[in-house]
Image: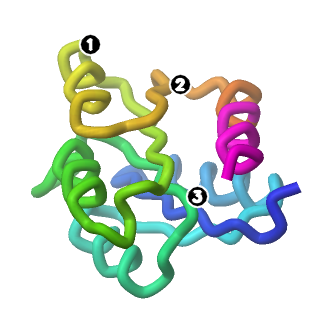
Amino acid sequence: MHGKARLLVVEDDADSRELLQIFFQQAGFDVFKAEDVERAIILLDQFHPDALVTDLMMPNLSGIELIEYVRKCPEFRCIPIIVLTASRKEMIDEAYLAGADHVFNKPVNFDKLYQTISKLFEAL
């Protein structure tokens, strides 16, 4: 369905990062992982992913700052951004204002996540 679309998963929790990688690989995606925003920016430049999946609460820079960075870069401005978070409503609102396309609360409903990502790639 998506061929081998590339996803960048940014999640500071190692177990969650691993689970997301397995989930997306089984769904047919090439998955690149970053444990923080600094690493995510390096991977963005190296691999030019087709979509970004990020947590909001991370050490150093936040997911909000990553979304803002992506939306300001001409080469990444249009990629879909999906947020997975356990954050308060204010941070979720801030994520949408920064440019997130979809926000999912943790624990994530993987069926809904898959449906959302599939629709995003069908639209590309």
Residue 24 image-quadrant placement: bottom right
In which quadrant of the rendered image does the N terminus lie? bottom right
Q: Which residue is mark 2?
A: 107
39 above or below 85?
below
Whether residue 101 appears in magenta in the rendering, the answer is no
Give the spatial CA distance, label 3 vs label 1: 26 Å
Q: Secondary structure at mark 1?
A: helix
Q: Earlier in the sequence, mark 2 or mark 1?
A: 1
Circles 3 and 1 in contact, beta carbons < 8 Å: no
Relative placement, left or right, of 60 versus 13 is left
Q: Residues within 10 Å of mark 1 (few under 14, many from 20)?
A: few
What secondary structure characterizes most of the magenta part?
A: helix
As drawn, which residue projects farthest toward the left? 60
**x, y percentage for residue 6?**
63, 68
| 3D distance between C-alphas at marks 2 and 3 | 15 Å
Q: How is the image coloured?
A: rainbow
- Residue at image x 13%, y 55%? 61
Q: Which residues are magenta?
A: 115-124
The residue under the point 46% across, 22% down is 105
Q: Earlier in the sequence, mark 3 or mark 1?
A: 3
Q: Amino acid at mark 3?
A: Glu
Give coordinates of residue 116: x percent, y percent. Answer: 67, 33
Which residue is tagged 1? 89
Marks 2,3: beta carbons within 8 A:
no
Disc 2 residue crowd, few under 14, some 14–19, many 20+, Cα 10 Å: few
- Mark linked to residue 18: 3
